[in-house]
Each structure stands twice: as C-alpha cells, then as structure tokens.
Image (spheres, rainbow, N blue to C red):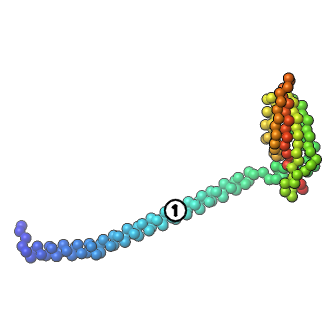
Amino acid sequence: MKLNSKQITKYLIQLIILFTVLLFIVIPYTHNLNLIYKNYTTEAKSLELKFKTGEDFEQLRNHYDELNNQIPTYEELLLNQGEELTLIQDLEQIAEKYNLIQTLTLDLQRDEITEDISSIPFNFHLAGDFYNVLEYLNEISNKNYNLTIQNLNIKQDGQGLEVNLLGYTYWLSI
C-alpha cells in the first residue's frame, strides 16, 4: 500500500495535532497530577506523624499513670516523728536475726530539708560475721523507710568484722 501525498499530509497533520495535545494538555496535566500526588503524600506523612505522636503521647500518659500509682507517698517513705523507738526496735530485731552486736546512736540535731521533712544523723556500730553484716545491710536497704549511709568503715578483728555506719534517717514532721 502506497501512500499518496494527501494521505501523508493528513497523517502529518494528525501527528502534529497529537503532539500539540500531548505538549499543551497531557504533559502539564501529568505534571499537575504529580504535584498533587506529592502534596498528598507529604500531608499523609505529616498526619501519620501527628497521629503517632498523639498515640505515643497517650501511651506515655498511660505509662506515667502506671508509674505514678507505684510511687510511694511521703508517708510510706519517711518515718513519722515520734516513731524513733519503733525504728530502733526494728533495727535491733534485724541485728539479732543475723547474730550481730549492734550499738545505735541517733543524734538529737534535726536538719530541716523542707518544711515537712527533716533528717537526723545516725551512727551504727556492728560487730559480727561478714555475711551476716551483708544480710543486715541488704535487709535494711529493703525497708520502706529511707536510710542513707554516708560513710561505711569496716575493720577486721580476730573474731569477725567491726562496721561503723554513718548516715541519715528522714522524718516527716506532721
């Protein structure tokens, strides 16, 4: 099949129209579609990030509430004023449990930390077996009330250890 010049011209005109439509309509339209797609994907990522952040915030708030319920109050951590004898008896029972000879000295001087909380220095002298001393220290560290040890001095004598503990007890002034 041979094409004559009229047909060639006709096909060329159609081809030019097709390229014109492609050049002026389809390509800009495609470009606009790509821009819209990029905008939507950017916005989707932004919304997803905001959602995750909100979700993370919700999880953080729930975790905070759980931890907050586990935190003991001042009343549970601090000794109440007037419970000095109870503290001494408790510490003596622990020392007796581990066959330790104990001498306790609570200072009368109170250091005000806040309006409601004060600290009282203490001095413990313990004598006994090394492992019993460790068990004693472990047990007093697991007590609800707060005792902080500032200085620990250990000497070995012929029969065992002599331990001096210097530290603070914390009291709630009601």
Give the residue pinned by disc 1: 48
Q: Determine the image quadrant of residue 8.
A: bottom left
- Front in this rendered view, residue 140 or 165: 165
Quadrant of image for the C terminus: bottom right
Tell me which residue sits at (84%, 43%) in the image.
167
- Front in this rendered view, residue 165 or 171: 165
Q: Position of residue 123 (x, y in %)?
A: 88, 40
Q: Position of residue 117 (x, y in %)?
A: 85, 54
Instruction: Examine the rendering and report whether any part of residue 96 can be seen.
Output: no
**Three-letter residue code for mark 1:** Glu
Tell me which residue sits at (88%, 38%) in the image.
124
Is 32 left, or right, of 122 in this rendering?
Answer: left
- Within 10 Å of disc 1 (Cα), the crowding (few <14, some 14-19, many 20+) is few
Q: Determine the image quadrant of residue 65.
A: bottom right
Q: Where 149 sits versus 43, above or below?
A: above
Is 64 left, or right, of 80 in this rendering?
Answer: left
Tell me which residue sits at (15%, 73%) in the image.
12
Instruction: Examine the rendering and report whether any part of residue 72 can be seen.
Output: yes
